[in-house]
Amino acid sequence: MSLLELKNVSKIYGELKALDKVNIHVDQGEWVAIMGPSGSGKSTMMNIIGCMDKPTMGEVLLDGVDIARESSKKLTDIRRDKIGLVFQQFHMVNYLTAVENVMVSQYYHSMPDEKEALDALELVGLRERAHHLPSQLSGGEQQRVCVARALINHPELILADEPTGNLDEANENIVLSLFRQLHREGTTLIVVTHDPEVAEAAQRTIVLEHGRVAREVNNENFDPNAI
């Protein structure tokens, strides 16, 4: 069953077609990587899937709802309730502790709950760092806080933009291990990346070139039980 479908989606800026009649689908519980060179349309696609922008034309069906036709207010609600966002730049509030940064996401969804936020940090192995400020955390720890923040509202879809781009190999492996765990638990993952090793961790890779889907590759070595 498809959680996400893009049907003939185009995004046009003047004479530039950032996306050009793109058709993709992502099944419930699937892990998909999106790759492509700079300017291929990856960021544009992420913004549209993440309800941060609308296509010029086409349909974007998320859980059966065409989000291309929704109002800005409705898109905010959908993003809050259904999507967990993980960015390359951590976007943490510098004067808030790790647990408070996680609770910020709860604030916009329902009610902040410190116990739930601590449980989310425990899931990413950072409960003992819960009361540290971002300046007291390593880059890998900050990214794991961001994963906890994305998970706190139990989204149907995790959308990650270059989530390992600022990490060393050890922390990249930790984040990928977290994604594997989420996938085993049934979370749908879309990871935008330039790193072939990160893409190879996914079930399927969609390659964009010049705003179009150039090819799709199934990962024959995908192991759902990998740690």
Image: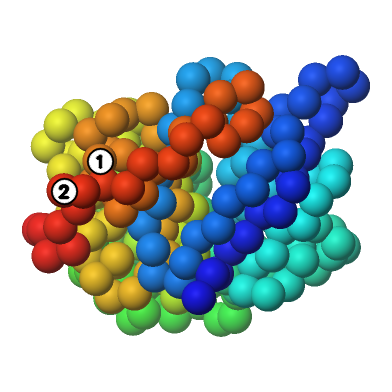
Q: Residues within 10 Å of mark 1 (few under 14, many from 20)?
A: some
Residue 98 versus residue 2: which sits nearer the camera? 2
202 left or right of 71?
left
What's the residue at 16%, 43% (across, down)? 173
- Observer able to see residue 92: yes
What's the residue at 9%, 58% (across, down)? 227
> With respect to residue 48, does 151 lie above or below?
below
Residue 156 versus residue 6: which sits nearer the camera? 6
Which mark, by number, is residue 221? Answer: 2
Q: Residue 188 location in percent, x, y?
A: 42, 65
Q: Quadrant of residue 72?
A: bottom right
Kind of residue at badge 2: Asn
57 left or right of 62?
right
Q: Mark 1 falls on what kind of element?
A: helix
Residue 6 versus residue 67: which sits nearer the camera? 6
Q: Earlier in the sequence, mark 2 or mark 1?
A: 1
Q: Quadrant of residue 119?
A: bottom left
Q: Residues within 10 Å of mark 2 (few under 14, many from 20)?
A: few
Q: CA distance from mark 2 to mark 1?
A: 8 Å
40 left or right of 123?
right
Kind of residue at badge 1: Glu
Which mark, by number, is residue 200? Answer: 1
What's the residue at 11%, 58% (across, down)? 226
What's the residue at 84%, 26% (across, down)? 13
Q: Quadrant of residue 183?
A: bottom left
Q: Residue 175 location in percent, x, y?
A: 24, 48
